[in-house]
Image (spheres, coloured by chain):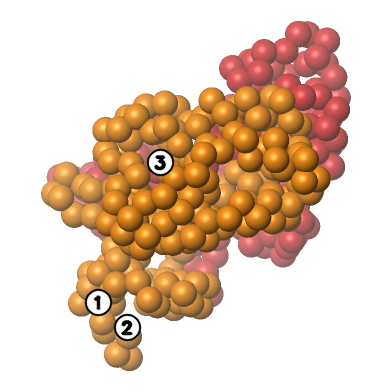
Chain colours: A orange, B red
Amino acid sequence: MSIILKQHIDEISPLTDDEFAFVLSHFTVKKFKKHQYLIQEGDLVQNDYFVVSGLLKSSHTDARGKEHILQFAMENWWISDPQAYHNQTPATLYVNCLEDTETLAITLHNREKLCVEFRKMEYFFRKKTTAGYIAMQKRVLSLIGSDSKERYLQLIEQYPQFRRLPKTMIAAYLGITRETLSRFEAS
Amino acid sequence: MSIILKQHIDEISPLTDDEFAFVLSHFTVKKFKKHQYLIQEGDLVQNDYFVVSGLLKSSHTDARGKEHILQFAMENWWISDPQAYHNQTPATLYVNCLEDTETLAITLHNREKLCVEFRKMEYFFRKKTTAGYIAMQKRVLSLIGSDSKERYLQLIEQYPQFRRLPKTMIAAYLGITRETLSRFEAS
């Protein structure tokens, strides 16, 4: 199962098999069942998770109890509560499984150790974080600059696999109601 | 004027004076007048800009000609079109000055060179980008999870200095109309 992590790192920082074995020794295999929570609000966040298989989401629950979805993650994606993980502050997000999921988990301690020990991995994480920043900025622009129907069409075009998600989750990701989403689908 | 860049880097990667002189040799001083554009849509983006003094904004103009503000930047902040800068693709944002502005500019070539030559700066840029990612994620959560009045109150609380910005710009940053903003201020 670790081959997909190697391919993922190789895209930015090509590694020999020996180098990858060293990198992999910093990760732990963690498997979760559908509906299981990896992170709950208030937790100390131990890990950043690289998804080997399955599907997860991260979300925030507001003061009124309404859920807002920040991110979905499938094979080849990373998911955690980044603020809580990097700053070691209590989680403000929930992360849970929408399907049975296998991950390779890395603690902040091991991640920082790996960056110090192995320059290619510091380069990898720097580039990967930059790509994540750019993706997050595009999401901000889409939220402030597009109407909700455009956001829905962009999402379905960019991630056709999201069609299999429950409609209520797509709506919670777009920041619209379930009823509004149904109108877009009908039109 | 470069002392504020040293203080800024020192917060993450403390540097000796000699090390900082070496870092600084990778930057160029660039000064701009109020209303001047650093980046326009379609440009090749040469630089990431560290703001020494002044005030700028980055924005996107949609297909209907409406402006949406992604970011403001003042002393100690960085501004550019990150996607265009890092991927060397044409700019999709505008960056312009709201006041006379002094910056220290670094090309992507010099930034990458500096990261290779000097480990402390690779660490600095990795940590700084992580912090930027977390800030951008908070903005996404605020956009999907708060109503526009909450967003306005959060903004004014987090950045009291934004009160001096024109109301139309605050509205374009929050993704609301000028009229809606006026109702919040009156209430």
Q: Earlier in the sequence, mark 3 or mark 2?
A: 3
What x and y, as percent, mark residue B17?
78, 8
Mark 3 surroundings within 10 Å by alpha-carbon count, few (fewer than 14), some (14 through 19), many (20 or more): many
- Contact (CB < 8 A) between labels 3 and 2? no
Quarter of image, res A175: bottom left
In terms of secondary structure, where does tag 1 sit?
A: helix
Question: In the picture provided, is B62 more to the left or to the right than B154?
Answer: right
Q: Who is closer to the viewer here, A89 or B1? A: A89
Instruction: Point out the frontmost of discs 3 and 2.
Output: 3
Q: Who is closer to the viewer here, B148 or B132? A: B132
Question: In the picture provided, is A11 more to the left or to the right than B128?
Answer: right
Q: Quadrant of the C terminus of chain B?
A: top left
> Where is mark 1, residue-wise?
A180
Q: How far apart are the alpha carbons under marks 3 and 2?
A: 31 Å
Q: How far apart are the alpha carbons under marks 2 and 1?
A: 7 Å
- Contact (CB < 8 A) between labels 2 and 1? yes
Q: What residue is rendered at 85% in x and 19% in y? A: B22
> Where is mark 3, residue-wise?
A81
- Amino acid at circle 3: Asp
Q: Who is closer to the viewer here, B38 or B24? A: B24
Q: What residue is rendered at 84% in x and 42% in y? A: B109
Q: Which mark is residue A184?
A: 2
Disc 2 chain ID: A
Disc 1 chain ID: A
Q: Which mark is residue A2?
A: none
Question: In the picture provided, is B84 more to the left or to the right than A76?
Answer: right
